[in-house]
Image (cartoon, grey):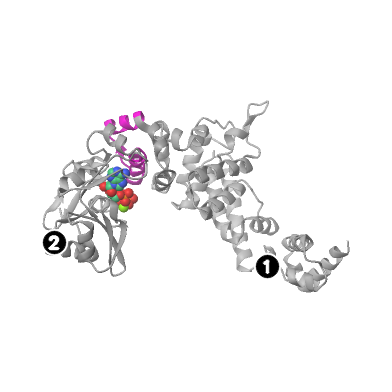
Amino acid sequence: MKIRIPATAKAILDALHARGYEAFVVGGCVRDSILGRVPADWDITTNAKPEEVKRIFSRTIDTGMKHGTVTVLVGTRQHEVTTYRIDGKYSDGRHPDSVTFTPSLTEDLKRRDFTINAMAYNDETGLVDLFGGVEDLQKKLIRCVGNPLERFSEDALRILRAVRFSAQLNFSIDENTIAGIVILAHTLSRISAERICTELVKLICSDHPEYLKVAYEAGITRVILPEFDEMMKTPQNNPNHMYDVGTHTLVSMMNVKPEKILRLTMLLHDVGKPSCRTTDENGIDHFRGHGEAGVKIAQDILRRLKMDNATMQTVLTLIRFHDCRVLPQERQVRRLMSRTGTDLFHDLIRVQEADILAQSQYRRDEKLQNIIAVTQLGEKIIREKQPVTVHDLAITGKDLMDAGVPEGPEIGQILKAALDEVLDDPAKNNRDYLLHLAARMARR
Ligand code: ATP
Ligand code: MG
């Protein structure tokens, strides 16, 4: 087995070897190379201690000295170089309590989570695969290194990582490993929100976001995202739908690009439905107000997961308007755009399209045609730089003050009224007209 190591990582291996140390590329990059996937990063494992690594390389960053990790810069690339180590227990769910350096590569590989992640390689020794990683790659299997119960007890995050890797690689999870997951899923409650969030985002941004269902069936979402379990239990007896809310959510994620904002939005777009469901006299389910209700619940979830604020706000805006259907009339499209902003307009269209594609066939073509027409109008509005926000108006707050409107809430009210007229008819976005309008309003 020969793996093509990029020149920068090779330079680091060579420098360590030249000084008598062992060094290998390890983990995800070995796995991905064997699979023919492009590795995200090339991590290195070595018996050199962190201080020794720092002495050898001129440009380094102390990434996690306590855990033995030094980042080495070669040209513009960075590689994490970590000393062979044995991890202690993760009692706080964040970091191993203690880390012991070891001279043994075997010990370092043993501490790793799954067989496919526990392989090392260099050109001199070739592949080091002590736990059947290659075989599991061939069998498309996620399997713990060693006893699953022990490994999940050391660090419960591995429970979620198993599903994350299975979603990224389209692998199944080994029988014993899944049995361990089911038994210990509840212990994910001890893991920090940040670590959960990272893995959850990787799961839903993978090629198979629908594997979230595996997490549901194994009792994982019950702990980290109980709102999803509610969705799985909420039927939608309505001609527009063919799935329960949870399954609709999974299918909607499959129908949108694997970008964090879009996938998170689809994950949570209908989170308001379980609490808004009503059934009419014909047995048809309705979910009035679920967009707004969902914004509140989604905000709680994203805060709980410690999602960064910018991502959270964007996702919440998309959820708020996901169900805001407009007819293909310029005026309506301008109004929608004035609420989302032009930047988010395209994302909102993608969200609405993914939503439709996860519904029943009922009037689907009509819904999709509508989306296409709205998109075209939106593009025309953007291309023509039509005014859609207060900032696009031909007058400013300062103009109004110069014209004698006192500073205060009235300024905002007038600008809003001006925008309202301009959204109906962009031709009215001229200074004279709007100043007249303002004067009329100020007199009232
Ligand atoms: P990605 O492509 O997502 O970065 P990766 O396999 O590199 O995948 P990382 O989370 O970057 O995953 O971890 C790098 C390596 O460190 C893994 O391949 C695995 O060997 C080991 N590892 C990471 N987290 C854990 C953990 N919680 N328990 C045990 N080993 C782990
Ligand atoms: Mg990695």
Residue 329 in view of the camera: no
Query: Residue type at mark 2?
Result: His
Tell me residue 43's x, y (percent).
26, 56
**Numbered range of the magenta stretch:** 157-183
Q: Of label 1 and label 2, which has the lower sequence position?
A: 2
Name the one closer to the observer, 194 or 2: 194
Name the element at disc 2: helix
Residue for point 15% across, 48% down: 104
Q: Residue furthest right?
A: 444
> On residue 10, which mark appears?
none
> On residue 17, which mark appears?
2
Residue for point 66% across, 37% down: 288
SS majority, magenta: helix
Tell me residue 393's x, y (percent).
71, 68
Tell me residue 125's x, y (percent).
11, 54
In the picture, measured across the screen, residue 170 lies left or right of residue 378, that is left
Residue 160 drawn in magenta: yes
In the picture, measured across the screen, residue 62 lies left or right of residue 442, that is left
Image quadrant in which the C terminus is located: bottom right
Between the C-alphas of marks 1 and 2, the distance is 62 Å
Q: Quadrant of residue 162?
A: top left
Q: Residues within 10 Å of mark 1 (few under 14, many from 20)?
A: some
Tell me residue 184's x, y (percent).
35, 31
Name the one closer to the observer, 377 or 30: 30
In this rendering, the answer to whether 387 lies above or below 32 is: below
Residue 41 in view of the camera: yes
> On residue 392, which mark appears?
1
Q: Quadrant of residue 221?
A: top left
Name the element at disc 1: helix
In this rendering, the answer to whether 58 lies above or below 371 is: below
Residue for point 31% across, 68% down: 76
Name the one closer to the observer, 356 or 214: 214
